[in-house]
Image (cartoon, rainbow, N blue to C red):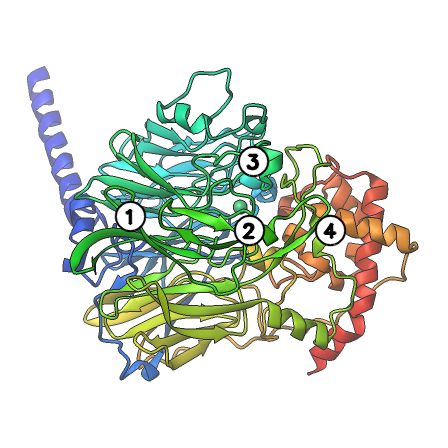
Amino acid sequence: MFKIILQAFNSHRLVLASIALVLGGCSAPIADIDGERIQRADSEPGAWLSHGRTYDEQRYSLLNQINADNVEDLGLAWYYDTGTNRGLEASPIVVDGMMFATGSWSVVFALDARTGGEIWRYDPEVDPAKGKDACCDVVNRGVAAWRGKIYVGALDGRLIALDAATGSEIWSVQTTDPDKAYTITGAPRVVKGRVIIGNGGAEYGVRGYVSAYDAETGKLDWRFYTVPGDPSEPFEQPILERAAETWSDDGEYWKAGGGGTVWDSMAYDPEADLLYIGVGNGSPWSREERSPGGGDNWFLSSIVALRPDTGEYVWHYQTTPGDNWDYTATQHIILTDITLDGSPRKVLMQAPKNGFFYVIDRLSGELISAGKYEPKVNWATHIDMETGRPVENPDAQYTEDDAKLIYPAPYGAHNWQPMAYSPDTNLVYIPTMEIPFAYKRDSKTEYHRFNWNLGIDVATQIIDAPQTPEVKKATRALVRGSVLAWDPVQQREVWRIAQDHAWNGGLLATAGNLIFQGSGGYFSAHRADTGQKLWNFFAQTGIIAPPVTYELDGQQYVTVLAGYGGAFALASGVELPVSEHHKLGRVLTFRLGASEELPGVTAEMVAIPEPPDSRGGKDLIDSGSLLYHRHCSVCHGANAVGGGVLGDLRTMDAKTHELFQDIVFKGVYAAKGMVSFAPVMSEPDVEAVHAYIIYRARQDYEILKGEQQQ
Ligand code: CA
């Protein structure tokens, strides 16, 4: 009897196992994405399998159904409302008819790539208080796909594996110390069965590293620290002993972490078996504050090559030795093979924040060439090819007594927004920025976990003037963006598309002789060879994400996430150039001949409330301005000008004014991410900030009303 039951049980189990096998083989999406399939990505150009499409992260598609001859017929095929109102920066993964992307607060969604219909949605439920630790918005740059799983790094430092078919959680690991200001905004990459993930938070004082987790189990495999830690502890990796020699002995940088976070770029060369990571700025920004007495401070602002199996250090190239300006080298890394002086070279290319374009031998780390890609860059004159080091401009050395107007700003001459490289034109397309910043050292402020710890005087940003059309025009003349077509062999500009707005989207290049990009509320297509504009679409919000393209049932699609946000949008105090925009996030997908329309900008043109009567005298307003710029402006905008992401404080309604002390001091809006600032401000401080905002609201009231009536 027992034997019969056992037989029945066994055969039943066999049947269940076969069903599972069938389900696994046929219906589970992305079940067979692995390194080999990603390496063969060019054999299935209809898919977008990994962050930059391929491991070399060129962001070039072989699809050419949409091309320079017919792109004018491109129309909206479908849109998906993400239900968010903060920045969207993700590169969707598209495979097997499904699209996987992320929105603000690390929410993941899986869509039907043909229709935009939602298949599943996963919310990691990040504590809104964590939003304050995100220097540059509660953004996320996308997922990775591998053997039936989707991986996302959540803002609070978790790395989470989801079932690609259902969105249910398979495993979750905390990759950071939750008591520190670490965040994750970057997309994971999967290399040889390991999920590689970095983190951010250098402005608040953290120590950077990158980690590798087993893709199946979530077990930590290795970790590479980018800066040395507590000098009384042993070095975690042999190379850190040498790195420590590049930091001053008396510096107490390690107490604040030193920075060097790996918050975005990575690339992988399977043949060389090298993983490349981009490393961020120092913490604090001022090198005198961070490493008194000097030193290059390895591996800040460096590109580092590692063995993906072990995390072992192979080589590095430091773009900005002794970083003094927040010049991260976390910007997009592209791998390609180019011909130089008649011989083929395997190179790595990067346009980091510092304004120089680097071509590096990716096997040895040798610098091949470097060219200034933004003419106004003045912190260094050139890169000395003998030493491989920048030659700093002596006239651009800022001190405690002397502010210096330096290009580029901490936003960079190029930030995280991805470039694209077309092997048809042999050009690199870079979303560049021409933005100055008045740097001035500040040695008076003490490290505080709650604060930005820059060692830089924030008062240089303050402009005590109404935002008149003349002031706005002057700002726009000073703060500009462009798409730059750059010849990496000759290190020279081929052409440039000047733009009305500085903070724009990433790039996509295609075999249709096209590049796609979002800028200032529009999504556009240009000829890849000449830059000629061929098509655009009003997206009703700013676009910062990079587009992707894919093909299904013989039809090519182009997708971009539209949702304005990120560092410049929050902090700069520069508004989008279009007035008819909203803050709703959307996935927009286009194909030839489609004619779907977005719902009109009903933008209930809310009345601009008349601000309360002025409070306090000049002293109170001035102290409020300083406190505002120290604690509030990084999210609410310099000079209380909201960039179009969070509410513009000049247009607060009567209720918000009434609750102001409760919101800022007591944290009654903590569930929205606006935490209490009691750790760094007293109630009288909050009163002073309020007096300053009312002062600014009154300065601009008539101007804002006038703009609304236009
Ligand atoms: Ca930074």
Q: Which numbered disc flags the more N-terminal residue, 4 or 1?
A: 1
Marks 1 and 2, how far apart in space?
A: 29 Å
Q: Which x, y percent locates residue 436?
A: 59, 60
What secondary structure is marked by label 3?
Answer: loop
Name the mark nearer the viewer: 1 or 2. Answer: 2
**Residue 260 coordinates in the image, percent (x, y):** 47, 38
Q: Nearer the viewer, residue 257 or 364?
A: 364
Disc 3 from disc 1: Cα separation? 33 Å
Q: Which residue is disc 1 drawn over?
A: 165
User: Which badge, 1 or 2, comes first in the chain's sequence?
Assistant: 2
- Identity of the residue drawn at 47% across and 62% down: 544
487 versus 214 height, above or below: below
The residue tagged with tag 1: helix, strand or loop?
loop
Q: Is residue 295 left or right of residue 62?
A: right
Q: Mark 4: few, some, or many residues within 10 Å (few <14, many ≥20)? A: some
Residue holding disc 4: 459
Closer to the N terminus: mark 4 or mark 2?
2
Label placed on residue 137: 2
Of residues 221 and 11, the one drawn nearer to the viewer in this rendering: 221
Which image quadrant: the C terminus?
A: bottom right
Q: Residue at x 37, y 33 (%)?
A: 211
Residue 561 visible in this rendered orientation of the protein: no
Residue 136 in picture, x, y percent from top left? 55, 50
The residue that mark 3 highlights is: 181
What numbered label is drawn on residue 379? none
Q: Report, in whole angstroms, how far the alpha carbon at label 4 lies from the one at label 2.
A: 22 Å
